[in-house]
Image (cartoon, helix red, strand yellow):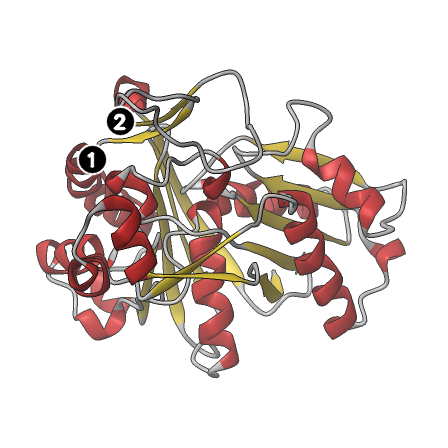
């Protein structure tokens, strides 16, 4: 089902030292515990549509895919440039995709890529030929530079996945869940994006709306929900954890992934961690990992479990055989 994936990252590279200075943090903690040496942010005059469109154009160029043969465009984002229209319509126009394409957005974050794959699988089963899944969540537009809980973790990135009935990866069972009782642990409070990193006022109060995250509660949520979701998905495929070659989890942080692997008794060598030069790119983390594994030739013939979890709070898990 998945043929190929492209990744687009902004040009502005923000080092751990810069973030440490903004947040009065220890750069060594950011590099070693969070696991991030640097991340990319959009500049004030750059938009999520720009970044997402770059990923789409790169995919079309690299694959030679005929845009006229694309039947759908699924855009996963909770941080669009505008409240309306949907980002998918803007990407369709910016990239010259056919007006016959079905384009819509999914308002999901960390679990969104797995949700989008399930929807794409359903669309392909109706007779559609091929489509694109785009992920793009530029959290830099809604974070305060001084907020240690968020700006030390997140980075901007976009991906584009070409999916078709002839793709190399066969999707298996899915497991999904939502627990809105924890929604306040990762949320954006405010009327909309202001186009720049928000800053606190002189008295320490928030001058503009911004992203809020309770990292401890997100970690507890991960430990409580993800292992059960993994086992439920594997049971639907008649597999055990030992049958999986790679566990591609949402790249929340190095600490969270190593803790999850330890709690689940997984060989850490089976849990790829690609976060050091991107940060947590929200809906784009899983496809970024798949892209890097594909480029390294590490996917062919392997059974891969993917699990996204976070904002919502929500989770989604699936198995794909390459």
Q: Quadrant of residue 150?
A: top left
Q: Along the horizontal axis of the image, is 140 left or right of 258? A: right
Q: Which residue lies at the image location 10% right of the left edge and 61% below the top edge?
A: 265
Measured as percent of width and height from the top left, residue 129 is found at 77, 54
Q: Which residue lies at the image location 38% right of the left edge and 65% below the top edge?
A: 304
Q: Which residue lies at the image location 65% right of the left edge and 42% below the top edge?
A: 74
Circle 2 residue = 185
Whether residue 205 can be seen here: yes
Mark 1 residue element: helix
For the residue pair 295 and 45, the one nearer the viewer reads as: 45
Which residue, as the protein is rendered here, is positioned at the far front?
202
Q: Which mark is residue 229?
A: none
Instruction: Check contact, mark 1 vs mark 2: CB within 8 A.
Output: yes
Measured as percent of width and height from the top left, residue 71 is found at 79, 47
Depicted 29 relative to depicted 180: above or below: below
Q: Which mark is residue 221?
A: 1
Depicted 142 relative to depicted 240: above or below: above
Q: Which residue lies at the image location 41% right of the left edge and 74% below the top edge?
A: 302
Q: Residues within 10 Å of mark 1 (few under 14, many from 20)?
A: some
Measured as percent of width and height from the top left, residue 36 is found at 30, 62
Marks 1 and 2 sit apart, C-alpha to C-alpha, by: 10 Å
Measured as percent of width and height from the top left, residue 201 is found at 35, 24
Q: Quadrant of residue 35?
A: bottom left
């Amino acid at each position: 089902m998945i043929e190929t994936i492209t990744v687009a990252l902004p040009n502005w590279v923000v080092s751990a030292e810069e973030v440490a200075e903004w947040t009065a943090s220890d750069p060594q903690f950011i590099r070693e515990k969070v696991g991030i040496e640097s991340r990319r942010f959009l500049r004030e005059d750059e938009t999520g549509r720009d970044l997402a469109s770059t990923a789409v154009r790169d995919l079309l160029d690299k694959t030679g895919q005929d845009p006229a043969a694309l039947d759908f465009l699924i855009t996963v984002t909770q941080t669009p440039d505008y409240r309306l229209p949907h980002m998918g319509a803007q990407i369709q126009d910016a990239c010259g995709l056919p007006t016959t394409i079905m384009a819509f957005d999914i308002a999901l974050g960390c679990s969104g890529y797995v949700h989008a794959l399930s929807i794409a699988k359903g669309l392909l089963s109706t007779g559609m030929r091929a489509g694109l899944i785009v992920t793009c969540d530029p959290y830099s537009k809604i974070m305060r530079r001084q907020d240690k809980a968020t700006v030390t973790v997140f980075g901007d990135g976009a991906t584009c996945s070409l999916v078709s009935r002839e793709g190399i990866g066969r999707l298996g069972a899915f497991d999904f869940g939502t627990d809105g009782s924890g929604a306040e642990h990762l949320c954006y409070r405010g009327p909309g994006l202001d186009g720049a990193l928000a800053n606190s006022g002189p008295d320490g109060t928030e001058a503009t709306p911004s992203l809020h995250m309770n990292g401890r509660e997100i970690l507890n949520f991960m430990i409580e929900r993800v292992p059960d979701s993994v086992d439920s998905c594997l049971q639907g495929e008649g597999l055990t954890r030992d049958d999986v070659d790679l566990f591609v989890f949402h790249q929340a942080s190095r600490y969270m992934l190593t803790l999850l692997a330890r709690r689940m008794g997984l060989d850490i060598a089976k849990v790829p961690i690609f976060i050091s030069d991107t940060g947590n790119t929200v809906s784009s983390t899983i496809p970024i990992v798949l892209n890097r594994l594909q480029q390294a030739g590490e996917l062919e013939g392997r059974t891969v479990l993917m699990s996204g979890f976070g904002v919502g709070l929500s989770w989604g898990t699936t198995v794909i055989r390459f």
